[in-house]
Structure formats: structure tokens, C-alpha cells
Amino acid sequence: MTWSSLIVYVDDEADNTHRIQQACRLAQAEGAHLIGVSACAPETPLADAYGAGILLGEVLTLQHERAETALRKAEDRFRDIATGAGLSCEWRAEVGDPTALLTRHARAADVLIVGRDAAAESGWRAPHPADLVMRAGRPVLVMPPVPARPLDGAPVLLAWTDGRESRLAAQLALPLMRRAEAVRVLELCDPMDVEGARARLADVVAWLKRHDVRAEGEARAHDDRSTGRRLIDCAEEMQAGVVVSGAWGHARMRQWIFGGVTQTLLNDCPVALLLAH
């Protein structure tokens, strides 16, 4: 498997230039086409239906014009960086909901690259990573605001559970893992199942090596830390640049209510996070 085209989402956050640069490096490494995507949903003004209704049309027109201006600035930023890197690239933008737009255009790429925190500050300007993972049908590479380490070529932590989501994430992340300095496949398991986990990991490592991925497996028994916290600690321990994980292995509503691995990673992971569902 290779990545022949990548989408990077372009917004107004401080980390956006760095995100585009990282996407360019990935596209160069893969010989891939890079697509810049941006959306801006006009903020709906609060208005008195009786007293201010006559002005509502003017306000909406102004909001639409502001959105179009933001998209033009985003395009300039993207093209300056992508063409400067000598890449094959194109631009797609629309006044509308960012998550919905990016979900539609996911058909054009192998992976979507987005920021982690922008939607929390301005959902009208950036996609929600969790919604995108569930809806896009593509792996989503979520970039933290200030990445602790470089992305391409850095060690990769593959979080393994013997289920559909992990298998899909591992397959879709093969292009990234092939170039990684090292790959650790980690399964956190019951203390009574360590030997079983090692046997499962041996199969995964052998499969990865047949795909030219330098990998090793490690089984660790659960302790008093949450699974998400332990994965983050392990990523820090091995100085990983990316954590690869299946997403929402349990019902998403359950994870929202009780907490879960995916939500912990999205909230706190200090390095890039590749998620697949």
C-alpha cells in the first residue's frame, strides 16, 4: 500500500503553517499529490426576530464575505508552501461546515491531516477530529499544536488490540511505518494473558516485516494507569513521533460518558496520532 494523495486541512490556527510543512514532507517522501482543503461556516448572528430581523440579511451577507476572505488567505498560505516545496498540488474550499466538507472530499485522498485543538476553539473554522474519524472512511492524522518530534521517519508506536480497528489502522499506516526509524507494536493485556499477547504480537510483527517494516512486539500487563495514559507514556519513553491506533473500538457514546482510549489520545497525546475506524 502507498499514499498517492494526501489532504491537509488549512485553518487560521498558529500551528497551521507547521502542519502544511509536515504534509509537504510526507507528500515528497511518498511522491504524492497534495490537496489543500478549507471551509468556513459563517457564524449565525443572534437577532431579535421582531426588532432586528430587517438587518439580518445584511449581517449574513457580511459574515459570508468574511468567510470568503478567510478562505482566500488560507489558499495563499497553502499555495506558497506547497508550490515552494515543488509539489503537485491543488486547492478546494467552500463556505460551509468544515467537518462535512472534509468528509465529502475524503474520497480524493488516502489520508487526511488535521489539527487537534482548532475545532474546540472555533468549530465554524476547523473540523472535529473525532467526528471526522467516524465519518470519513479514511485514516486521519491528527497533529498536536506543538509536535514534540518530527513526523516522517520518526519511531512509531502501534497500539495493538486484537480487533478490527487495530488491524485496519496498521494496514493504512504501512507507508508511514515503512519509513520509520523503528516500530513498536504494543499490547496492554491482562496479567494472566501476557504469553497469549506475545503470540498475537509475533504474528503482527511477522506480517509487518513482510511489508518491509522494522518492527518489534511488546506485551505489558495492565497497571493502575488508564490504557490511554500508558500509551502516551510509552510513546514518550520511546520518543515516538507518531502513535497509530484504531479508534472507537467500543461504542462512542460509552467512551464519551465513561472515558476511553481514543478520547484520552485525542485530548492529551503530545505527538501525531493516526486514527482509523
Image (cartoon, rainbow, N blue to C red):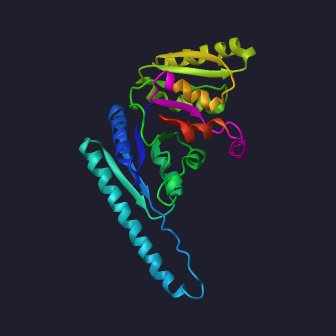
- Left or right for 22, reference 255: left
Q: Residue furthest front?
A: 224
Q: Residue furthest right?
A: 192
Region in magenta: 236-259
Does 40 appear above or below 25?
A: below
- Residue closest to the eye, 93 or 150: 150
Residue 13 x, y percent position in the rendering: 41, 52
Does 201 appear above or below 145?
A: above
- Left or right for 231, reference 96: right
Membership of 241 in magenta stretch: yes
Membership of 135 in magenta stretch: no
Does 73 appear above or below 167?
A: below
Residue 214 x, y percent position in the rendering: 46, 17
Quadrant location of the C terminus?
A: top right
Residue 40 x, y percent position in the rendering: 45, 62
Does 252 appear above or below 168?
A: below
Q: Residue at x 36, y 44 (%)?
A: 20
Could you say which quadrant of the image residue 24 lies in? top left
- Residue closest to the eye, 223 or 29: 223
Q: How many marks?
A: 0
Residue 160 x, y percent position in the rendering: 61, 25
Q: Residue at x 68, y 45 (%)?
A: 256
